Amino acid sequence: MKILKLPKTNFKLFMEGLQNYGEVHVPKRKSNQSFVFGPMENTSEIAMDYLRTINPPKKYFFKPKDTLFNFSSTKGFTEVIEDSDKKIVLFGLHPCDIHGLKILDIVFGTNYPDKYYFARRKNVVVIGLSCMPDDKCFCRSMGTDATEDGFDLFLSELKSSYLLTVGSSIGDDISTDFKHLLAEVSKKDTNEYLKIRKERKNRFTLSLDTSDLPYILELQRESEVWEELGKKCLCCGSCSMVCPTCSCFNVYDIQNLITDSGERVRQWDSCLFKDYAVVAGGHNFRVNRADRVRNRYYDKQNGFVSQYGKPSCTGCGRCIQYCPTKIHVVEVFNKVRGEA
């Protein structure tokens, strides 16, 4: 692992230079309380102090609505992978979102690799950015508050500079090209980093006890907590849409008016939607809201653990921030534990 220093006085030149590697996308302010990832028009619009965007970075690889192929009675099938050759530099991912991508790599890469996802994934340079938690962050509990891989470059902020960690061969190429902007890390820089790291650790106010949680969930399948939650949850799917690891989708065809051609589309879906579990014949395995809510919680902290050895929640806090009825995921699990 190679670590260098980028003085803040060189940051603007660094960001402008990244455009040589692709279209640079950065966190930008959308309103007083919300942020989005979008193309960089000017370095002054980069929201370096953001904590979470509305939509997570998965939108670049697993698009909200995606045409898989076109079909025609005369031409047959024509595969479509939108943006498969588009080079993007995705700047500013916090450690929890990098872990989110690592989880999606597992989901889309196991058993039946998803070529649409990976065609875009290979063309994106990921540059991470350190952060300070707020009262909705519980990434420390999920083990996603730091990362040693999953990025090409990672910037850890100090007062007047950034520690720049190289995480891949393309990251090494970029650091070599920008060597005139970089400097060696001093003992003073190291001490400052350790001080900030300690301060960051103390900023966490929210935690989730994940010890034996899958076991407790197995015991609590019939808990009244799920019925209570079902009455409060609107099943609007907001938590699924903003989740960095939710990957449910629906597939359908759109035909032209004379039905001789059309396109097959994949679109984000949510297990909270009433018709999500409807099967042929009209039977619905989860017709009740309480069943759908329970299913989502179990998938994150039980099912994924059973299949891949770790939960699929990153503790980013998006589901807490954007739930219209203020359902708090940590409070729910505390109730399941009988601690609230």
Image (cartoon, grey):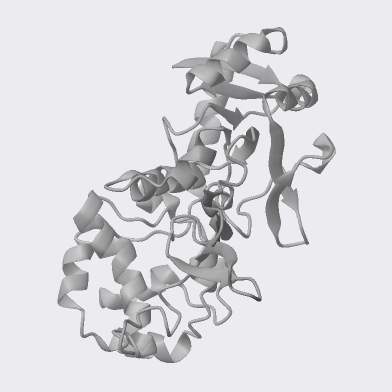
On the image, the x and y values in percent for residue 241 come to 53, 66
Residue 56 lies in quadrant: bottom right
Q: Would residue 214 be seen by someone viewing this image from the given angle?
A: yes
On the image, the x and y values in percent for residue 131 come to 58, 42
38 with respect to 97 (left or right): right
Which residue is painted at 60% across and 54% down in the image? 52
Q: Nearer the viewer, residue 57 or 202?
A: 57
On the image, the x and y values in percent for residue 154 come to 55, 29
Q: Would residue 134 be seen by someone viewing this image from the given angle?
A: no
Q: Nearer the viewer, residue 159 or 256?
A: 256
| Quarter that holds the N terminus | top left
Residue 337 versus residue 65 in the image, above or below: below
Q: Nearer the viewer, residue 204 or 106?
A: 106
Which residue is painted at 44% across and 51% down in the image? 139
Which residue is painted at 59% across and 65% down in the image? 261
Looking at the image, the residue that sits furthest to the front is 74
Image mark count: 0
On the image, the x and y values in percent for residue 164 come to 58, 22
Residue 269 versus residue 90 in the image, above or below: below
Q: Nearer the viewer, residue 288 or 154?
A: 288
| Quarter that holds the C terminus | bottom left
301 with respect to 175 (left or right): left
